[in-house]
Image (spheres, grey):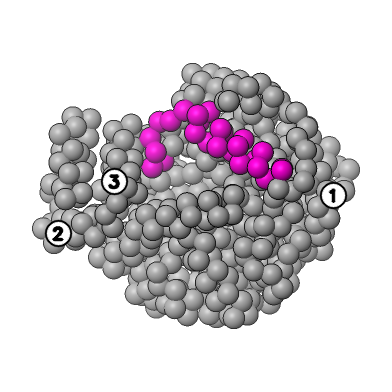
Amino acid sequence: MLAFDLLAQLGKNPSLAAAWQRVARLPEDRIALLLELYQNLPSGRTSSALADGLLKNFVDNPAFLEWAVRLVERLSAASLRRFFENLVVREMVEGQRVRQEFLAREGFEAPVTIVLNPTLACNLHCTGCYSYKMPRKGMDYALVRKVLGEARAMGVYLITVSGGEPFIYKHFFRMAEEFSDLQFMTYTNATLIDEELADRIAAVGNVMPAVSVEGFGEETDERRGVGVHDKVLRAMSLLRERGVMFGFSATPTRRNSDVLASDELLDYYLDKGVLFGWMFQYIPVGKDPDLSLMSTPAQREQLRAKTKEWQVTRPLFIGDFWNDGACVGGCLSATRYCYITPEGKVQPCTFVHFYTHDLHEHSLLEVFRSKFFRAIRGRQPYERNLLRPCKIIDAPEVLRELVAECGAQPSYEGAETILEDGEVRAHLDRYAAEWGRIADEVWQGPEYQGGDSVLVPFLGRINANQHFYRMRLDHAARERIEAGGGRPPERSGLAASRTRTK
């Protein structure tokens, strides 16, 4: 009944007419599958809330419905079924129930994803890659089993797999097959995806490759190597032919940010069949960070504006991790996700190469209960302005204070450079100040209204001050009490925001 009610409401809404007509033209077997999947949603308050949220999101942003229709049109039956069962039913419905129970029991939110790095081995040597000089040994499969089992017990059904190159890891498909109830989003350079590998990806159904690009052919080959772009296009063609859900990931740098912020580039990859996209600002971490690769604050704003435009004008799920803080309440590290190295060290995020706990000696739950993770959560959000979410590049002094306070150790040789190198410190401080001036003006402008109006995927337009920000402040206060700490230093209007959101 839920499916028919939702579809009926969509059909009655004039702003969704075009997408609804495409739904009506779908083949009968695809409509039957779609209705079957919706009807198999568990009954209850969470499912009803999901349906209400989808409808609100579709009305607030019709492009999002266009994207959903595109999924149904493009994906194979196996990929669509896995996507729906793992991400919609398990992650959004069943996982939400588990996470609510977790919050009531533990007093803090459970993660929604885990970033698993099973290997740092790679067949490319990209300019500015922080992992190239790190150890290349793969993760022991027993540790993979431990991580995924404990993550699932916490309500996590979306696993993000990074590298190195994940498809080099010899147990990759063993992992995907054994944990078929989990969805794996995999960052890959795609150069290893031939017909045989594409067939395996299609067969398991629960692997979503995010193909790394740097722009068009010129930009991709410049950073990744001559001929890489042609291999990327070949891989995309093979995945599209097989109905696999795939997208792109890109690293904006000073050299390519202008290209990545162009309509032509996005439409180019839409035409290749991508269904989602991620933007990752270049972060100067590792032993020898290249500060010249960092995008300028002006380039970052250019990309932010374009990404927000694309979210309402293109049938694509696209996110910019450093510019979409308002959509998730700020930084997600040590809160809604963590990063696990091949050696089992648990970092609060992909780019914070410091740790206090190792999964050979501790459980994943113990990591999230740790002083380091509690201290991070107790400081979030680091800024009143949720467009300044990152403790590395937006509030660099926070990272320095947290590492010192908790005695966190470098995960790899050279990780301490970002804290101790005078040139790097000065550069990040200047960057944070300049970006802060730009971000504060945008935050107070008509697009965000100081946080009162934020368009969020899956939620539609919300008041972030009454949603994410209030929730984050309440949780942060509890974490500081649990950790035995006091109030964090007042920063950029945090005191005013506490008054406002009480």
**Element on which disc 1 rests:** helix
Q: Based on the displayed image, in which of its 4 quarters is residue 157 positioned?
A: bottom left
Instruction: State the mark number for residue 404.
Output: 1
Q: Position of residue 175 (x, y in %)?
A: 49, 76
Decide if residue 209 is in sight here: no
Contact, CB < 8 Å: mark 1 with mark 3? Answer: no
Q: Position of residue 384 (x, y in %)?
A: 64, 29
Mark number displayed over residue 32 = 2
Q: Nearer the N terminus, badge 3 or badge 2?
A: 2
Q: Which mark is residue 48?
A: 3
Magenta highlight on residue 500:
no
Residue 47: mark = none
Question: How many residues crowd mark 3 within 10 Å: few (<14), some (14–19), many (20+)?
Answer: some
Q: Position of residue 44 (x, y in %)?
A: 29, 51
What amino acid does circle 3 point to? Answer: Ser
Q: Which is more N-terminal, label 3 or label 1?
A: 3
Q: Which residues are magenta?
A: 457-481
Which residue is painted at 18% across and 56% down in the image? Answer: 35
Give the vertical position of 12 relative to 177 (above or below). above
Q: Nearer the viewer, mark 1 or mark 2?
A: 1
Look at the numbered discs 3 and 2 and tell me whether their residues touch, using CB distance below 8 Å. Answer: no
Give the residue at x 18% y 38%: 9
Q: Secondary structure at mark 2?
A: helix
Distance of label 1 from label 2 (alpha carbons): 57 Å
10 Å neighbourhood of mark 1: few (<14), some, or many (≥20)? few
Left or right position of 395 against 6: right
